[in-house]
Amino acid sequence: LVFLASHISKAVTLLVISAIPGQKTGHICYALALFLFQGVLSNISSITDLGGFDPVWLFLVVGGVMFILGFAGCIGALRENTFLLKFVMFLGIIFFLELTAGVLAFVFKDWIKDQLYFFINNNIRAYRDDIDLQNLIDFTQEYWQCCGAFGADDWNLNIYFNCTDSNASRERCGVPFSCCTKDPAEDVINTQCGYDARQKPVSEVDQQIVIYTKGCVPQFEKWLQDNLTIVAGIFIGIALLQIFGICLAQNLVSDIEAVRASW
């Protein structure tokens, strides 16, 4: 019975550990790190307030740790190696770090909001400096139906879109096309739709017809509030999966040791 229970526990543990986003998360983080490392968004360290720290290394470390944990758990369950199975116990540390990060994010939500505002504004300044960064900003503004960090006037930070008299750009007092409201009848994107969109004396009512006037930070907060149940459910599901994996790994280790003790 102990032998049968051990094999059943082994099979279930292997399935759960395989389902834990360990190796998949590791692969995703590695792919994202290489994507950034190869020059895509190569100036990302310059637009973050991290003291010159390159976020690519964070993705590399997280990807490496998650891959090792997932790989060790799978091999440990297959080979009934208690040493490798005990690596899965590090999921408890990861779970604690995730819980700590969630609490800190709630406590320091105003600081996170300021950092997001700082990050978006730095992206606005560098809009024309990197084509990949430009595409990322355009995708964000189209998806959230927003313009700038807290409004369309944030584009005054960009040397091509600001409204100063010294700006000779044709895009002066305008916004990128991704800020424009979409006309369902248009099949081709009008990349010049944002020209003179902020030129005075355009009223705010008229402006809302042409471009999005809400900022991306408030729109992101609104999206979180509207999808709070889904977001919370995803995080709770991942947490429960991690706890379940830890419990099953510990149970399998105990079964293996019990079988070995009976020899």
Image: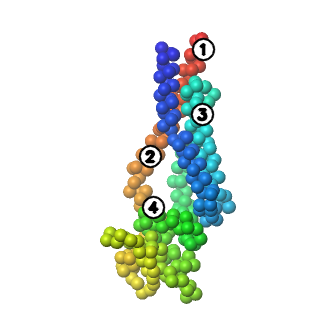
Q: Is disc 1 placed on a helix, strand or loop?
A: helix
Residue depicted at 45% across the width and 80% down the height: 195
Quick check: 107 left or right of 197? Answer: right
Q: Is residue 221 depicted above or below 66 in this figure? A: below
Dot 3 alpha-carbon crowd within 10 angstroms: few under 14, some 14 to 19, many 20 or more: many
Residue placed farthest to the top in the image? 263
Q: Is mark 2 on a helix, strand or loop?
A: helix
Residue at the disc numbered 2: 234
Residue 108 position in % (x across, y down): 55, 57
Q: Closer to us: mark 3 or mark 4?
A: 3
Disc number placed over residue 220 in the picture, else none: 4
Residue that label 1 marks: 261
Say whether residue 89 is visible: no
Identify the residue at image location x=60%, y=14%: 261
Up-down relation of residue 47 to residue 24 (above or below): below
In space, the residues marked 1 and 3 are separated at their CA atoms by 24 Å
Tell me the kind of residue under disc 3.
Ala
Q: Are marks 3 and 4 in contact (CB under 8 Å)?
A: no
